[in-house]
């Protein structure tokens, strides 16, 4: 089984250390291209391994497309089963869940699983099939996370289209009152997220793995699900308490996004490939840094990003009063400088559902003027660089490992910013201990 230890490097690059994966007590089964267990391992019966023929070299050429094809197969099966249960349930809820998942984003998490598997030596058809299945499961759990998140945040848009609950609400007949339609849309979205999560768990359970590898994958998967819920809860609690602590904001972001978006996909791919504990631990260390950078980039995009690129309205985190690191750092810096006009702007804006575009522009100006935006940009660069250094210490960066490194580096890539919106250099004025904690 996996055991957890406290991280040795307690740098401020990441918040409280996440659970780390340490060497398993015995090696996972490694498979040859013929699908049989490699000599000297406690292999499962080859008949128990994946029966689907998957050529890793073919998948390498277009991983998102391969994930899409696997999704089609899995969702067709799930919809068929749902239809046997009840046609209306399958048509109104199941079909929407399937469509939302298939019309997903860049398949980043499933790509991380694939390239982590390949970088750790996975090169046979059975291992490739298993990695695709785990990728499909991640796409489904992402559907669960996004649909539920939009309900909790009251977000009207997702990926440039109406959010799930908004689409269901608007699809109600004209005879339904707006209030009842809204409640139905929200309730249906909760059930849709639950359904996507159930399907994701089914896919993981059905993935053909030898017993030891399956036990490692199940534990990583279980940890990831709990971390997602914990992070979302901390995010909601932060909104309620109006928390403005940079360190607490980083902690919530680490649980809600960094572990789920980067660390656990890397761990799942490495586990499927039968990587040793040292390699898996190093990959997870790299993932924690890159994942934190990924979340900070997402925070910046919410305020400064282009809705045509992000697929959602700007300022959602500000209007919801989310305890993001960017917002917390802006407040800390304004307080440290006794910048009363900036504090007044933030007091009016944070948590104001009716914040206008002009009000959001004022928040942007404060974030630039206090140096908070520049500090977050610099922190993203440091986190990304630290993550890649951990990665380079784990694997020889050639072939698939090089592809994985490129994918990690792209997660926190600096977004293109119009010249007028570029941040100014951070001020050299002294800041409080709380602010110093946030920018180390």
Image: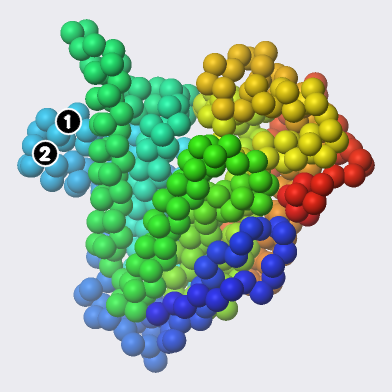
Tell me which residue sits at (66%, 46%) in the image: 245
Tell me which residue sits at (43%, 27%) in the image: 154
Q: Nearer the viewer, residue 113 or 165?
A: 165
Q: Residues within 10 Å of mark 1 (few under 14, many from 20)?
A: some
Q: Residue 161: x and y, percent?
A: 43, 23
Determine whether, in the image, residue 335 is placed left or right of residue 279: right
Circle 1 SS class: helix
* Label 2 or label 1, whichever comes before in sequence order: 2
Does the residue at mark 2 contact the one at mark 1 (Cβ under 8 Å)? yes
Q: Residue 177: x and y, percent?
A: 24, 11
Res 91 label: 1
Look at the image and tell me whether residue 203 can be seen. yes
Q: Residue 405: x and y, percent?
A: 63, 58
Q: Residue 422: x and y, percent?
A: 79, 29
Q: Quadrant of the N terminus?
A: bottom left
Residue 374 vs 56, above or below: the answer is above
Quarter-of-image position of residue 186: top left
Q: Residue beneath label 2, please?
A: 83
- Mark 2–mark 1 Cα distance, whole angstroms, equals 8 Å
Tell me which residue sits at (57%, 27%) in the image: 351
């Amino acid at each position: 089984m996996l055991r957890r230890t406290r991280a040795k490097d307690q740098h401020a690059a990441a918040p409280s250390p996440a659970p780390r994966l340490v060497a398993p007590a015995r090696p996972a089964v490694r498979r040859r291209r013929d699908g049989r267990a490699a000599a000297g391992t406690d292999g499962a019966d080859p008949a128990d391994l994946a029966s689907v023929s998957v050529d890793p070299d073919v998948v390498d050429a277009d991983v998102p497309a391969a994930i899409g094809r696997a999704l089609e197969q899995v969702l067709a099966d799930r919809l068929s089963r749902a239809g046997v249960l009840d046609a209306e349930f399958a048509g109104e809820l199941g079909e929407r869940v399937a469509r939302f998942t298939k019309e997903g984003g860049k398949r980043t998490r499933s790509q991380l699983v694939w390239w982590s598997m390949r970088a750790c030596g996975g090169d046979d058809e059975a291992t490739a099939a298993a990695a695709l299945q785990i990728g499909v499961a991640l796409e489904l759990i992402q559907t669960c996370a996004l649909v539920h998140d939009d309900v909790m945040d009251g977000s009207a848009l997702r990926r440039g289209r109406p959010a799930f609950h908004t689409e269901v609400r608007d699809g109600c007949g004209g005879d339904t009152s707006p209030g009842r339609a809204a409640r139905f849309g929200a309730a249906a979205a909760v059930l849709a997220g639950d359904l996507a999560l159930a399907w994701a768990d089914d896919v993981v359970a059905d993935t053909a793995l030898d017993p030891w590898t399956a036990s490692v994958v199940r534990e990583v998967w279980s940890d990831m699900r709990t971390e997602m819920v914990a992070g979302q809860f901390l995010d909601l609690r932060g909104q309620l308490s109006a928390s403005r602590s940079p360190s607490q904001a980083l902690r919530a972001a680490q649980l809600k996004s960094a572990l789920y978006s980067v660390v656990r996909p890397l761990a799942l791919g490495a586990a499927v490939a039968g990587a040793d504990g040292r390699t898996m631990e190093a990959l997870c260390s790299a993932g924690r840094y890159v994942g934190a950078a990924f979340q900070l980039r997402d925070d910046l995009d919410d305020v400064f990003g282009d809705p045509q690129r992000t697929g959602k309205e700007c300022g959602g985190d500000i209007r919801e009063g989310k305890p993001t690191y960017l917002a917390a750092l802006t407040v800390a810096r304004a307080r440290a400088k006794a910048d009363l006009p900036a504090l007044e702007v933030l007091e009016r804006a944070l948590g104001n559902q009716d914040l206008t575009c002009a009000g959001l522009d004022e928040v942007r100006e404060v974030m630039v003027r206090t140096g908070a935006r520049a500090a977050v940009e610099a922190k993203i660069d440091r986190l990304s660089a630290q993550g890649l250094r951990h990665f380079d210490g784990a694997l020889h960066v050639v072939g698939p490992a090089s592809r994985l490194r490129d994918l990690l580096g792209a997660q926190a890539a600096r977004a293109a910013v119009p010249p007028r919106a570029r941040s100014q250099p951070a001020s050299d004025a002294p800041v409080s201990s709380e602010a110093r904690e946030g920018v180390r």
